[in-house]
Amino acid sequence: MKASIYYEKGDIRYEEISVPEIGDGEILMEMEACGLCGTDIHKAQDGTVKGPVVLGHEAVGKIVKKGKNTDRFNIGDRIITAIHVPCFTCHYCNKGQYTLCGQFKNTNIEPGGFAEYIRIPEEHVKHLVHIVPDGVSVEEATLAEPVACCIHGLKAADIQTGDSVMVMGAGQIGSIHGQLAKLKGADKVIITDISEFKLRKAKELGVEYTVNVLNENLGERVNEITRGKGLDIIIIAAGNFSLLAEAVSLLGRGGKIIVFSPFDKDNMVEIDAGRFFRDEISIIGTYSVTPYDFPEAMDIIEKKKINIKDMITHTFPLEKLKEAIELAADPGNESLKIIITA
Ligand SMILES: [Zn+2]
Ligand SMILES: [Zn+2]
């Protein structure tokens, strides 16, 4: 079979590798589409993983082979799977903090999403595989994973009816957060970016207020939009860690900041520490997705509660993964969600 293999920055090869063998409880999926995630782009462009490795974790496809004890599924079923499974028994799992589980990051699909065939291990089959509903295209179904990640983040935000929410960053994750915030009852939703294209796109997807921070004063705009009340929730969905300091200064009393970006270990910011006691603000980090966030994501996509279809700006065939990543990494590019198809 063919796979697009990442070796190092700028070196992705479309190569022949062997089809994975499956055992009892396992499934072999023929990949039909796999979303290109911001983290794939980050890994490939910043060289944060060691090659050779097959990236991709938003894969959708058909079951072509299954082992014993997989009666819940049939050959030909179209499925989606997440890639990390918690153990359900450790200290963190017992507290419901599944993404902190020691097993979580050590579990994966083989060889990765950007391959023609993918082995789905037994633990994944048990807990993470979902049937794609009829009426949802394979391309749209790939968005279940990022939507579920955003749902996981928004659980921590606990948006209340009438809240003012600001999403910093109008990329693929920010534009999902913006739409979900509205769905969860937010009154005002503001999204910021430096790309006119992404802001225009966010507006098209139903996010009411857009601010281009290159040429507009964000503080003034927030004041004007919230009528001086300030922001109840700020979601950071862009890779610039200095946004955290800005978010603390823009947050309203009693507000929450959700940090949804993979900042690096030594990223330091200065914030007004007095705001925690004085204004009861909080800063919450969220990472990845738990098995319990998927059903809601599938429901939202199936019932078209948010606009997934118009988020997809490009599709590339598997052999063009390198070009897809280069496009997404180009600062002035006009892309939002890119899907790789087999
Ligand atoms: Zn992802
Ligand atoms: Zn665990």
Image: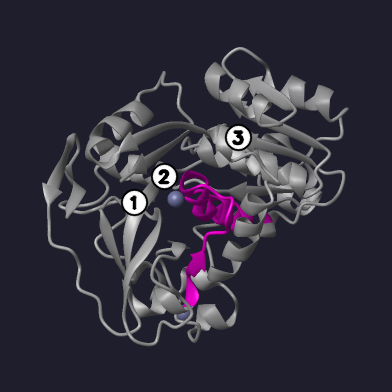
- CA distance separating discs 1 and 2: 7 Å
Which amino acid, mark 1? Gly
* Residue drawn 57% across the image and 63% down it: 294
Q: Which residue is under mark 2?
A: 37
Classify mark 1: helix, strand or loop: loop
Q: What's under tag 3, amino acid-wise?
A: Met
Rendering quarter of residue 292: bottom right
Q: CA distance from mark 1 to mark 3?
A: 25 Å
Q: Residue at x 61, y 65 (%)?
A: 295
Q: Picture coordinates of residue 54 (x, y %)?
A: 24, 53
- Position of residue 53 relative to residue 181, above or below, is below
Cβ–Cβ under 8 Å for marks 1 and 2: yes
State the CA–CA distance, disc 3 to disc 2.
18 Å
* Amino acid marked by disc 2: Cys
Q: Nearer the viewer, residue 35 or 176?
A: 35
Visible residue check, residue 48: yes
Closer to the camera in the image, 192 or 139: 139
Mark 2 falls on what kind of element? Answer: loop
Task: Name the N-terminal-most of marks 1 and 2.
Answer: 2
Q: Which residue is mark 1?
A: 56
The residue that label 3 is drawn on is: 168
